[in-house]
Amino acid sequence: MVTIIPPNPKPWHSPFPTRTKTKTLQPKIVSTLNDSNNETKQSSAGKIKREVLTNEGRTKLNTYSDRDFYAYPRFVTHVDGGFISTLTNLYRQMLRPGSEVLDLMSSWVSHLPPEVSYKRVVGHGLNAQELDKNPRLEYFIVKDLNQDQKLEFDDCSFDAVVCAVSVQYLQQPEKVFAEVFRVLKPGGVFIVSFSNRMFYEKAISAWRDGTAYGRVQLVVQYFQCVEGYTNPEIVRKLPADSAAAQEDKSPISWLMRLLGFLSGSDPFYAVIAYKNFKPVYE
């Protein structure tokens, strides 16, 4: 039945008294709250659960801008050939061909296996001249993550994010690891590798003052402070002469190792975790 309402209808008044019925509408608050709770549950992954570093632990000896410090390109390798070979083999094992990879805090050299083809490799760093020399990068962004941790990529953009020998310079690692989580696809992997070398004045206090074991645990905590990462896995490869080197704790030997004169082979450490789950490939 179609009801036709004429234009400007005349008001009609009943000759009998009427009782107005009040219709109680069901509030939508319940539904909205339920939706909000669902959104909260869905969006809890990637949230920072706690701060790992104290304010003091974030400090650097050199307080000048990192952009100024890295303004001039350094076309050198910061770790030895053994470390690089171990890292390349790790990438060969863990990064599937055809993956989309973000090389975070990268440089002029690539540690990705040269024979493996990836769908896309994007770089990030602080010196455009260095990044421009990197043969594996499709393109790159120049950004100081200590000033702004936001990554200019959509959610779920990459199958893998790698960060080699640079995590020691992050002053807001919790936020950076949360951003990495955001840009990773579900099941995507984040591989953080490092050794005992560093720009001492640019490394954060918590890293400078830590032991090798303590630094590994620090990176483990970076992963654990962000909701949604899998339990971190640790890869270690120590040189054969590391035990003997550790026994000599004289100040002179410590200083010479710090400057690289008695370093021997560089120890290799990597901490690895996945977004939401660890995929299983047949």
Image (cartoon, rainbow, N blue to C red):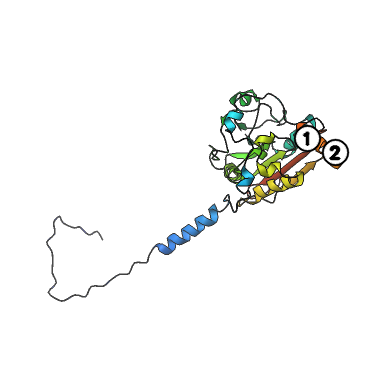
Q: Upstream in the sequence, badge 2 or badge 1?
A: 2
Badge 2 element: helix
Please name the residue that numbered disc 2 is placed on.
Answer: 245
- Residue 276 located left or right of residue 39: right
Question: In the drawing, does residue 6 fall left or right of residue 160?
Answer: left
Image quadrant assignment for residue 73: top right
CA gap between label 2 and label 1 equals 12 Å
Residue depicted at 65% across the width and 39% down the height: 160
Kind of residue at disc 1: Leu
Of the numbered discs in the image, which one, if any, rests on residue 274? none
Please determine whether, in this image, residue 13 is positioned above or below residue 158: below
Whether 280 is drawn above or below 88: the answer is below
Q: Which residue is mark 1?
A: 255
Q: Is residue 279 visible?
A: no
183 lies left or right of 232: left
- Secondary element at image label 1: helix
What percent of the width, then of the height, locates residue 72? 62, 24
Residue 88 x, y percent position in the rendering:
74, 33
Quadrant occupied by the N terminus: bottom left
State the residue lying farthest toward the front.
251
Amino acid type for the residue under numbered disc 2: Ala
